Every structure is written in structure tokens, then in C-alpha cells.
Image (cartoon, grey):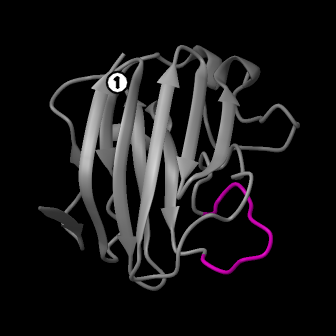
């Protein structure tokens, strides 16, 4: 089946995951905005207690930043803009092993991240600001996985979580 987010709140796993591989497909409408939260500790404060892989209609954008599709939101831009145009299915594999986070979108490696490099609250390793009150190196290495709702339609399917 297809899980379609078009209002009504975020959706969360019942259990927590530490080291895992998450594989899924998503389809965006024009100007859609969502996210895949992972290792989230407090569901009432997911933004500050989890990590977000941005899911956003940034198709066709020449230069991507830390707020575009495939970014670790507000922290790390994807290596390239790999998202397909609205209405097409995108394939994502997100892997978490200790401090190491990798993401592949549509066959392109877009994220290679070591959480231990994020040593200060509110700052990325390149000294640019982020909005987080806790340094990623100090965040829990396990938590809930969820799909963020921003009110615009986003579809998810073929969602598989494999604990490691």
C-alpha cells in the first residue's frame, strides 16, 4: 500500500531503532515538504531530539543547500540534487551505524556523515549555524523513525526497516 501524508500529523514507529537500514520510496507533489526523522528521542520535540533527512520538492535546483531534498536538515547539504520531478517515485536507502550516517537517493550517494564531527550545539563542523540545542555527537544513538507532516501531499511506499 501507499502511505499518503496530506495533513493530520506525523507518523512514528512503535519501537526505537539504533543501527539500522531504512529503505523506502517517496513521491512528492509540487512544492511538497516533509522529512524522515530518525533516532528521535522525544516525539513531542522531534526537531530538537531527532535527525531529519529532508524530503522536499527541490527538483531542478542547480545548487543544493542544507535545506533541500536529501539534506540532513540545517546541518549538511546533499552531495548532489538527486530528487526526481514531482509525481515520480524516488528510492532512498538510509543507513545508520554508530556515528556514521549514509543516504543514497535514486542510486546516488548524497550523504556521508559522522555525527561525532558535530561537537557544538548550534554549529556545524564548517562553523555555519544550525538550530539544534544539542550537538549531534551528544544525541542518543537510538530513537523512533517517523514521517513528518507539513500539510502538502507526500506519498511513501515499500518502507522497510532492517535493524543491524
- Determine the image quadrant of residue 116: top right
Residue 41 in view in this figure? yes
Quarter of the figure that contains the C terminus: top left
User: Residue shown at 74%/60% (left/top)?
Assistant: 65
Q: Is residue 113 above or below residue 108?
A: above
Residue 66 forms part of the magenta stretch: yes
Q: Secondary structure at mark 1?
A: loop
Q: How many marks?
A: 1
Is 21 on the left or on the right of 65, as rendered?
A: left
Left or right: 106 in relation to 77: left
Magenta span main SS: loop
> Which residue does the image show at 78% across and 35% down from the upper left?
124
From the viewer's side, name the closer residue of 146 and 93. Answer: 93
Query: Which quadrant of the figure has residue 61?
Result: bottom right
Percent coordinates x, y for residue 34 in the rendering = 41, 62
Is residue 10 visible in the rendered structure shown here? no
State which quarter of the image contains the N terminus. bottom left
Q: Position of residue 53 (x, y in %)?
A: 51, 48
Q: Is residue 87 left or right of residue 157?
A: right
Vertical comparison of 44 with 33: above or below:
above
Residue pointed to by mark 1: 143
Question: Which residue corresponds to the image point at 32% horizontal and 36% vertical from the top-left?
Answer: 145
Q: Whole-percent x and y of residue 44?
A: 30, 39
Is 126 a magenta residue? no
- The stretch of residues the image draws in magenta is 59-68
**Residue at the (43%, 57%) spot, across then down:** 91
Tag 1: Cα neighbours inside 10 Å, few (<14), some, or many (≥20)?
Answer: many
Amino acid at each position: 500500500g501507499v502511505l499518503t501524508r496530506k495533513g493530520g500529523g506525523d507518523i512514528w514507529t512503535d519501537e526505537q531503532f539504533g543501527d539500522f537500514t531504512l529503505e523506502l520510496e517517496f513521491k512528492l507533489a509540487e512544492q511538497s515538504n516533509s522529512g524522515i526523522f530518525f533516532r528521535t528521542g522525544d516525539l513531542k520535540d522531534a526537531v530538537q531530539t531527532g535527525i531529519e533527512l529532508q524530503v522536499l520538492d527541490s527538483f531542478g535546483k542547480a545548487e543544493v543547500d542544507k535545506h533541500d531534498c536529501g539534506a540532513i536538515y540545517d546541518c549538511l547539504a546533499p552531495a548532489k540534487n538527486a530528487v526526481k520531478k514531482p509525481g515520480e517515485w524516488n528510492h532512498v536507502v538510509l543507513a545508520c551505524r554508530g556515528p556514521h550516517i549514509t543516504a543514497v537517493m535514486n542510486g546516488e550517494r548524497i550523504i556521508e556523515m559522522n555525527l561525532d564531527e558535530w561537537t557544538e550545539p548550534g554549529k556545524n563542523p564548517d562553523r555555519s549555524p544550525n538550530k539544534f540545542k544539542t550537538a549531534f555527537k551528544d544525541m542518543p544513538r537510538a530513537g523512533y523513525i517517523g514521517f513528518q507532516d507539513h500539510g502538502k501531499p507526500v506519498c511513501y511506499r515499500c518502507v522497510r526497516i532492517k535493524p543491524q
